Structure formats: structure tokens, C-alpha cells
Image (spheres, grey):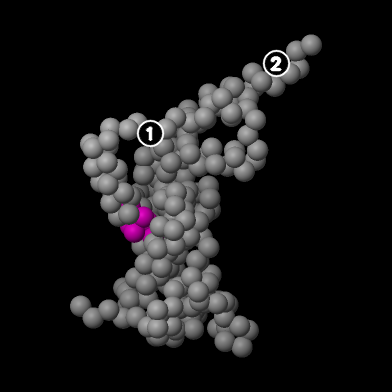
Amino acid sequence: MLKITPPFLRDGVSFLQIPPLTSSTMLPADEKALIEAFQSGDEFAFVSLYNRYKTQVYGFCVKMLGDKTLAQDVLQETFLRVYENRERLIKTSSFKSWVFTIARNQCLNQLRRSKRQVSLEDDVHGDPAPPVPQGQVAHLEKSEQVQLVNYFLDQLKDDYREVIILREYQNLSYAEIAAVTRSTLSAVKSRLFKARRKLASFMEPVLQQEQERVAAQRTP
């Protein structure tokens, strides 16, 4: 199968190095017009769409994979597939969901490869996963609190983690999440409810510890 490569990648240029379009080359801001131009082969339209969605898609990949380098690789692979398969996009209204579907599939493939590797390493070494540092929780800075939430987020099953990320971090609608995950609306709502409940159960000991610390400080 002949692979179609954008001209700006033929000399080894990464998607991550593509600069934002200047005002002189920007196409109309209307997304439908951009997508139609992209489908017609306009590469400026493709770059404009890339610049529009790269931050959201990269953020999703980082949360799913927990690795910025892998997330960059998946981001690039996602938009390369978008470029190569633009003729498969039938409805322009589904572009956002389509991009996230491709990114999700690439993330899940990467997670499966990583888990197979971890499984092999566990068979050889038998080393347990490191526990969360409970003794330091009460004194964490805001950045460390974010890291802790990310730690618990990473403990969720893949199908729970993805709906949390798509809804809470990327602000996708229930309908968009259903399209991305190829689920029904009711299934998405159910999965989100269970994912939030599971995440809350992970966080409960941490919150309890913080409440006890605050109560102790108030006691004369």
C-alpha cells in the first residue's frame, strides 16, 4: 500500500515542528470550510486543523499513556493517519470525534504493547508496583497533588480512564465520547459514573488523611 506523506514530512520534519500558520496563509476560521478544503487536498487546511487540535489530542495522549515522549509519538502517528485517510471522513461534523477515535486507538495499541512488556518483566523479576507515598500526602504542593491525581487516574482500567479524560479534561460531550469509544450514550454515562466512583474510592483515604490533619491542627 502506497503511503501518502505530506510534503513538510518528506524531509524528516516532525509534526511537532510545524509552526502555526501566519495570517497571510490562514484559511477561513469556519471549521467546516477547513475540513472540506482538507478533504480536497489543501495542505494549508490540514496544517490549520493540526494546529487547532494538537493540544487537545496531545493532552489526551499524555493522560492515557502517562509518558510525554510516547504521547508525542502517538500525536504524530494520529495526524499522519488523519492525513492519509482523509477520504474516509464522510461527515465534516464528525471530524473532532474522528481525530480522537484515531488517537484513542493508537493509545490503546501502545498500552497493550506496554502491558505485554511489563508482563514479561514481571515474570522475570517479580517486582511489585511501588505504593503511593501515603505519609507525604498531607503536605503535598499543588503540582504534587496533580501528580497524585494522575497516579490514581493511571490505576483505573483503560475504558474508565479514557472516559474520565475525554469528559473532564477534554470537555467532550457525551455524544462525542460515544462516537470516539463506539459506545451508546447510556453506556458512556454508566461508564463515567463507575469511573468517577472508582476514582473517588482511590482518593478517599487521601482526603480522610487530610481532614484528620486539619482537625488535629484546630485542636488546642
Is 105 inside the magenta-drawn segment? Answer: yes
The vertical placement of 21 against 207, above or below, is below
- Percent position of residue 183, x then y: 34, 50
**Lower position in the chain sequence, tag 1 or tag 2:** 1
Image quadrant assignment for residue 145: top right
Residue corresponding to mark 1: 129
Q: Which residues are magenta?
A: 103-108
Amino acid type assigned to the residue bearing label 1 in the image: Ala
x then y, percent, for residue 102: 36, 62
Mark 1 to mark 2: distance in Å? 32 Å
Quadrant that contains the N terminus: bottom left
Q: What residue is shown at x 41% (from left), y 50% (from top)?
A: 65
Q: Residue at x 48, y 60 (%)?
A: 58
Question: Element type at marker 1?
Answer: loop
What's the residue at 57%, 80% (across, down)?
Answer: 21
The answer to whether residue 189 shows anywhere in this view is: no
